[in-house]
Amino acid sequence: MYEKNGEKYFIVDGHMHWWDASPENWKNKYGEGWIRCFYGYHSALSPEEYVWPFEKYCAYTEEDLMKDVFEDGYVDIAVFLPTYLYDFYHKGFNPTERDAILKEKYPDKFVLNTAWDPRDGEAGLEVLEEKVNRWNIKGCKLYTAEWRGDSKGWDLRDPWSVRYLEKCRDLGVNIIHVHKGPTIWPLNKDAFQVNDIDEVATAFPELTFIVEHCNLPRLEDLCWIAVQESNVWGGLAVVLPFIHLRPRQFAQWLGELLFWVGPDKLTFASDYALWHPKWLVEQFVDFQMPEDMVSEYGELTPDIKRKILGLNLAGLYDLQVPAEVMKQASVTA
């Protein structure tokens, strides 16, 4: 929990990883290129004191993660979002089974999600059910631009994708995180377009679709969809780091998201280890709308920050929130 000026914040990091991008795990040039692209985002947007050496970035340890996220980073509960990339990495980049090691070791610290790919067909449906039953999973992370052999991505409206969404609904896996944002080399930007969210959100009102990265650099498209689809949310990974070097750009993006998507449907995310949650939490709690933008976007109140930093995801994942945080939230609501 984080406290500043008497205000208390329950922190749920809604998007994090424990990846293995060590050179030994690179399957080809794409494995190396992928992590170097990640490192470019990390080094360009982080404060200087939070930039890691490339070697550590490729394969950070369990001890690194636990210290950075929970001891130093103020996070109360972190949500694992796996990314497989078996075409690029021998053992996968960040598969469910790897994240599950830490979930089982620290059960109160993590929410474990899994992933699926409609190109796996019938066999993949069986694997999905096995994972859901084994780990009591409530959410999935989807990567529509992931390469698979000759395929350079897929669409949520594809018939097999619809089968998987039906399976999620039937299994009670009701939270669907979808990467729709900046491209990562060598993936194709077009496969990250948010257009397919619109149709499936209407077709599956029981599911909540969290658009991770808020569809940057096409944020406006997300806004127009989320304002009409009550089950479409925005995950602020990648949006948040701009608070450091481009605060006015961040203020504009956040202002538009608050107006169109709403403060009840936005979620905090560090995307660790892309960025360290400590500086993101501190700078977000301190952040205020520039004076000349308040008339258009309004004040960024502690209660709005409380919702984004943890209460929204706590409600979605049914997480226990400390009474002192809820008391402040109820007083200011």
Image (tube, rainbow, N blue to C red):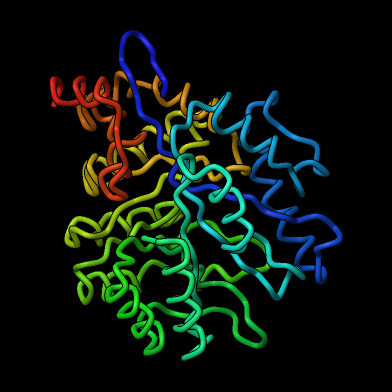
Residue 6, percent from left and from top: 31, 9
* Residue drawn at x 34%, y 51% as measured from the top left: 234
Instruction: Work out whether 140 lies above or below 169.
Output: above
Instruction: Work out whether 156 lies above or below 121.
Output: above
Instruction: Work out whether 218 lies above or below 145.
Output: above
Q: Quadrant of residue 69?
A: top right
| Quadrant of image for the N terminus | top left
Instruction: Work out whether 311 lies above or below 25.
Output: above
From the viewer's perspective, tell me whether residue 237 is left or right of residue 320.
right
Given residues 204 and 132, the one toward you in this image is 132
Q: Residue furthest top?
A: 5
Q: Is residue 185 visible?
A: yes
Given residues 261 and 56, the one toward you in this image is 56
Residue 145, percent from left and from top: 54, 72
* Residue drawn at x 48%, y 57% as measured from the top left: 181
From the viewer's perspective, tell me whether residue 225 is left or right of residue 141.
left
How many badges with numbers are in the image? 0
From the viewer's perspective, tell me whether residue 31 is left or right of residue 125.
right
Q: Residue furthest right?
A: 24
* Residue drawn at x 44%, y 32% as measured from the top left: 76
Q: Is residue 179 visible?
A: no
Given residues 136 and 194, the one toward you in this image is 136
| Quadrant of image for the C terminus | top left
Residue 142, percent from left and from top: 47, 67
Residue 195, percent from left and from top: 35, 71
